[in-house]
Amino acid sequence: MIRGTTKLIPMFGTPLAGVRAPTLFNAYFEKINADAILIPMEVQSNYPAAFREVLKVSNVVGALVTFPYKRNIDLADAVSPASEVAQACNVIVKRPDGTLYGDIFDGVGFAMGLRRAGFNFENARCLLVGCGGAGAAVAAALISFGVSFVGVSGRNVKEAQSLTNRLNKYAGNRAQAAFVSGDPEGYNLVVNATPLGMKDGDPLPFDITRVCPGMTVADLVMGQETALLRAAAARGCKTQPGTRMLFGQLSPVSEFWGYPPVGFDEVIGLAKSLGWNA
């Protein structure tokens, strides 16, 4: 129930018709009796101005940011190291002094989903196809979770090489990143971080005949079973849908805004209660 005391959390992006975050977060807020609501706000033009005006509202405590506005990190007063690497943020919190702090939890949510599925991060070789904000955050999280190598592939060579440089600086001696082709052969994990798969009829983001049984193929495109994941499963690969990235984010994002954490199994249960195939 919305009251005069309700805290507001806008979700910025466009298009928003297919997003699931408001449904999941609001179900969680209701479950814990939090006086808060996540509100989708589709901004199609002049996003910086809209963002600044909405965040001035006194009972707005933060924001969730999705495509295509994650790269607007300059709208926050400060951002996390992960956001610096990704050059993107998807969550904003308003601090007590009124300043805005940004972070990105796409990567953490993705990695938590993999961990729950039993993926072994230690010394794993990973291929990231696409290097947008969410993909960059995933690459940084994979390094934090213990993989040894991240290959970055992207059509924008300059952007992919820039991400590779930032990842190597972030990794130090923990891991290595390199700009590579999009050939998935020889990797333990292949991640589609491109928009391919968002629309029916999209081509697959890489040559699916180059994957083999035992590999894990993950898609950041929301949906339980994309064309890529169906094709990978048919070739004997383990798969992870984009929804797991959302499920894995609920707890750390809620804590970021000052709400209690929740276990991954509880999130899955919540998703199932909404009728989702979790």
Image (cartoon, rainbow, N blue to C red):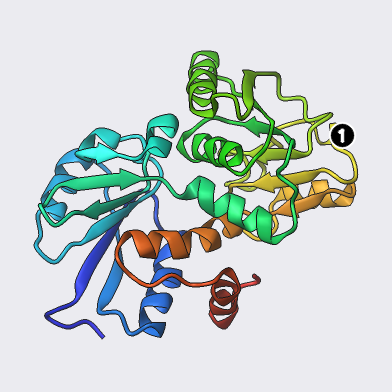
Residue 247, visible in the rendered structure: yes
Dot 1 lies on which element?
A: helix
How far from the left and from the top, in percent, is residue 142? 60, 40
Q: Quadrant of residue 77?
A: top left
The C terminus, quarter of image: bottom right
Q: What residue is pinned by disc 1?
A: 209
**Nearest the camera: 33 or 17?**
33
Q: Is residue 117 left or right of residue 97?
A: right
- At horizontal 19% and vertical 54% (from top left) the residue drawn is 94
**At 75% across and 52% down in the image, what residue appears?**
239
Q: Position of residue 193 (x, y in %)?
A: 58, 38
Tell me the residue at 9%/63% (across/down): 58
Compared across the picture, whether 193 is left or right of 80 comes to right
Which residue type does callout 1 highlight? Thr
Left or right, residue 75 beside residue 252: left
Category of crowding for the residue at label 1, using alpha-carbon neighbours closer than 10 angstroms: few (below 14), some (14–19), many (at least 20): few
User: Who's the residue at 77% across and 46% down the image?
Assistant: 216
